[in-house]
């Protein structure tokens, strides 16, 4: 493959995997990071043979600096960068503003550079929240903001809506689509863990002594990246305005624990076997921020279907059991989880 693709957020878990797959296919990649002097060496160490095929630009979601240079000469954008913190910020604007303004900035500069294909990394956060009576979702569903949702959920929903509106009003010929992952797991490449991986790490290193009655839908970082690459390569009419959830299976934390124990028994000795009673979660919630988040998710099913994505983009997702096993094995290999 030839051509240069801009991947924003090259330091991130998903951004890194997208770059990995694009370089492996022969593309050149421009990537944005917030701090070149801090990040470039690390990126070059991951792709030592990329040479001139990988260029690193400094560009923050909150500033115009560097975006024109990063977009120059590119044929498509995978806009992955967005704040994804572990905790809940005091002020929701810490997430909503960079997510939304950053996406609009990325779109504006892509359009200015004549780029006609833009894939936004949105989230199942923009699909499956604010509907208390519903537990199965697909690409046609939208999070209901009027129900009141946590800041990260709002940031992803507002950013995706804003992007679609901006394209319709300002760049109707641009081929725009989103990839909407559920919780992303899979092999890790460095110690800088994404929020989703942090959860598996805490399950496996014994930090979580009992598993709350909480579940999540699982997907694999390699499938998330492949969805981006396929969305860049597919014929325009098959992807234009589409939403591509990446999701395999909704699993309770206790099921995830069972999978880890059965797939990697020698590594999963610290995975809790006991369940945490709901009453304990509720008692801890006012004092422990993580428990406050868990409390909001107790006994909730948010089962997002990725079938549409498999059908339209033409590939089959990795089994969730494999994803979880590969996550644990790579955390142990890197010494992040000690057994
Ligand atoms: P991650 O590893 O934390 O990566 C986040 C990336 O965004 C980093 O490269 C970070 O750069 C960049 N970023 C954050 N704020 C920025 C700013 N103000 N200016 C420029 N760059 C900024 O998280 P991830 O899991 O790869 O997530 C990437 C994307 O996937 C996000 O849009 C997230 O919402 C979405 N997503 C993730 C999951 C999941 O489970 N992991 C699920 C659904 C959707 P720095 O290195 O400079 O911080």
Image: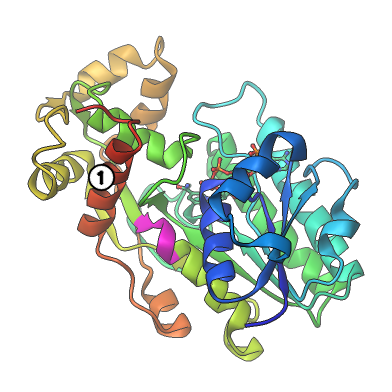
At 29% across and 34% down in the image, what residue appears? 298
At 53% across and 70% down in the image, what residue appears? 24
Q: Could you classify mark 1 by the number of other residues whose Cα lies within 10 Å: few (under 14), some (14-19), or many (20 or more)?
A: many
Q: Which residues are magenta?
A: 219-223
- Horizontal placement of 311 versus 64: left or right? left
At 22% across and 40% down in the image, what residue appears? 253
Q: Quick check: which quadrant has ligand 1?
A: top right
The residue tagged 1 is 329
The picture places residue 196, in percent across and down from the top left corner, at 42, 41
Q: Secondary structure at mark 1?
A: helix
Q: Residue furthest top?
A: 287
Front in this rendered view, residue 329 or 179: 329
What quarter of the picture does the C terminus occupy?
Answer: top left
The picture places residue 91, in percent across and down from the top left corner, at 67, 25
Majority secondary structure in the magenta region = helix
Where residue 222 sits, quadrant-wise, is: bottom left
């Amino acid at each position: 493959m030839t051509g240069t693709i801009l991947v924003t957020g090259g330091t991130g878990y998903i951004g890194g995997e997208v770059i990995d797959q694009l370089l492996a296919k022969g593309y050149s990649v421009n990537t944005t990071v917030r701090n070149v002097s801090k990040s470039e060496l690390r990126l070059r160490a991951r792709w030592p043979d990329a040479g001139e095929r990988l260029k690193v630009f400094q560009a923050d979601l909150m500033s115009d600096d560097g975006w024109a240079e990063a977009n120059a000469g590119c044929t498509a954008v995978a806009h992955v960068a967005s704040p994804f913190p572990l905790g809940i910020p005091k002020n929701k604007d810490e997430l909503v503003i960079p997510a939304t303004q950053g996406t609009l900035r990325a779109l504006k500069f892509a359009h200015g550079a004549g780029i006609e294909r833009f894939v936004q990394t949105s989230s199942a956060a923009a699909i499956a929240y604010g509907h208390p009576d519903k537990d199965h979702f697909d690409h046609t569903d939208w999070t209901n903001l009027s129900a009141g949702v946590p800041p990260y959920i709002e940031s992803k929903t507002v950013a995706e809506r804003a992007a679609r509106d901006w394209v319709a009003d300002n760049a109707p010929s641009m081929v725009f689509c989103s990839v909407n992952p559920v919780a992303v797991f899979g092999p890790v490449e460095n110690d800088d863990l994404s929020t989703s991986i942090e959860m598996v790490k805490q399950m496996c290193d014994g930090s979580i002594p009992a598993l709350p009655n909480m579940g999540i839908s699982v997907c694999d970082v390699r499938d998330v990246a492949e969805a981006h690459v396929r969305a860049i390569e597919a014929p325009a009419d098959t992807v234009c305005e589409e939403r591509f959830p990446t999701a395999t299976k909704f699993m309770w934390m206790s099921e995830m624990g069972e999978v880890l124990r059965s797939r990697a028994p020698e590594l999963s000795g610290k995975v809790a076997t006991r369940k945490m009673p709901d009453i304990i979660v509720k008692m801890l919630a006012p004092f422990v921020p993580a428990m406050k988040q868990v409390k909001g998710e107790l006994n909730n099913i948010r089962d997002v279907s990725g079938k549409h994505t498999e059908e339209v983009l033409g590939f089959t997702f990795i089994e969730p059991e494999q994803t979880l096993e590969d996550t644990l094995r790579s955390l142990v290999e890197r010494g992040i989880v000690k057994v």
